[in-house]
Image: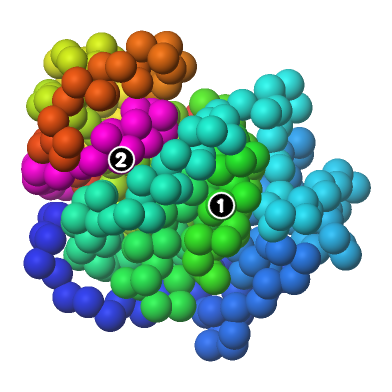
Amino acid sequence: MYDPGGETGVTAGGGPDRGGGRAASARGGPLARMGGVLDDVIPYLACPHCGADLARAGEALRCRAGHSFDIARQGYVSLLRPGSQGGGGDTAAMVRARGDFLAAGHYAGLAAELSRAAIAAGPGPGCVADVGAGTGYYLAAVLDRLPGRAGLALDSSKFALRHAARAHPRIGAVGCDAWRPLPVADAAAALVLNVFAPRHGAELHRILNPSGTLLVVTPGPGHLGELVGPLGLLTVDQRKQERLAGKLGPYFTPDGQREHQETLVLSHQAVAELVAMGPSSWHADAAALGDRIARLPDPVPVTLAVTLSAYRRRPAPATP
């Protein structure tokens, strides 16, 4: 059961033995970063073409079938599957706005809540995988509380991955599509995070260790309520929790839920960043939005209201 008051100082267990042996963190050795990608996350990855193990080959990752993936100079590797659309996800402007907003500490309380839930889950063997990791902000906060644990930041935006690769010394950033099979080994993750991000129930189930925990953060009905009307932002689906249960129910059982709510005090600049980093930025006219923000009090109180849900993995269905 999710208990936000759990013990701190959990130490990572070993990763899967996928040809190259256990990760260095499990051996007690230092985490190694060469060519920008954290070597300790490679044992948790799988080739997006054939599903085979990946290994480092100079400045690339390669499987035994010869499929090769260059490591970007910014420190991430793209493992987008064949047919996936590259260059998707958040734009450079969205990522820049998110980086500035989160760096100012506005969502630090949420990050702390998520970290407490991660500790309470008591993760066993495996990495921490953040599906739809964005800039790696939440994953970095969780890794700070789980010494020695390697983290996988999974996202489709190359701009977000560039940030995530630098967000924490134990993060490996990997490009992929959250709606398609993930380039992650079966049962590789002790803990899976999903914060304001797409969720593919079958894939989250596949990559989570049978003893692991899935932590999902979704916006509540009152989230950013003071801004929705005045700025014409997208509203939260009132049936979001029902839809979440429908998507995850076949694969997971609920293991606790907590509402997190706090009042933020945001300057006009912070409000502009908040809008620019989210889905409403795709629909907003910049000039009109600027005029609407100027009419708000400065600073303006804004409600952060989210639901943090914990899930345990159902047994895999029996194969005929």
Please give the name of the residue rendered at 23% of the width and 41% of the height, measured from the top-left corner: 267
Judge left or right: residue 185 versus residue 150: right
Is residue 8 visible in the rendered image? The answer is yes
**Residue under numbered circle 2:** 270
Question: Is residue 303 or residue 2 the one in the foreground?
Answer: 303
Residue 163 badge:
1
User: Considering depth in this image, is 26 or 108 the residue closer to the camera?
Assistant: 108
**Residue type pointed to by label 1:** His
Residue 243 lies left or right of residue 136; in this view the side is left
135 displayed left or right of 312: right
- Residue drawn at x 30%, y 17% is 291
Q: Are marks 2 and 1 in contact (CB under 8 Å)?
A: no
Q: Secondary structure at mark 2?
A: helix
Residue at 45% across, 71% down: 149
Q: Secondary structure at mark 1?
A: helix
Residue 178, position as x, y percentages in the image: 52, 32
Closer to the camera in the image, 218 or 189: 218
What residue span does the magenta drawing correspond to?
255-278
Q: Give residue 264's position: percent from left, percent from top.
A: 15, 44
Q: Amino acid at mark 2?
A: Ala
Q: What is the CA distance from the residue labelled 2 to the residue labelled 1?
A: 19 Å
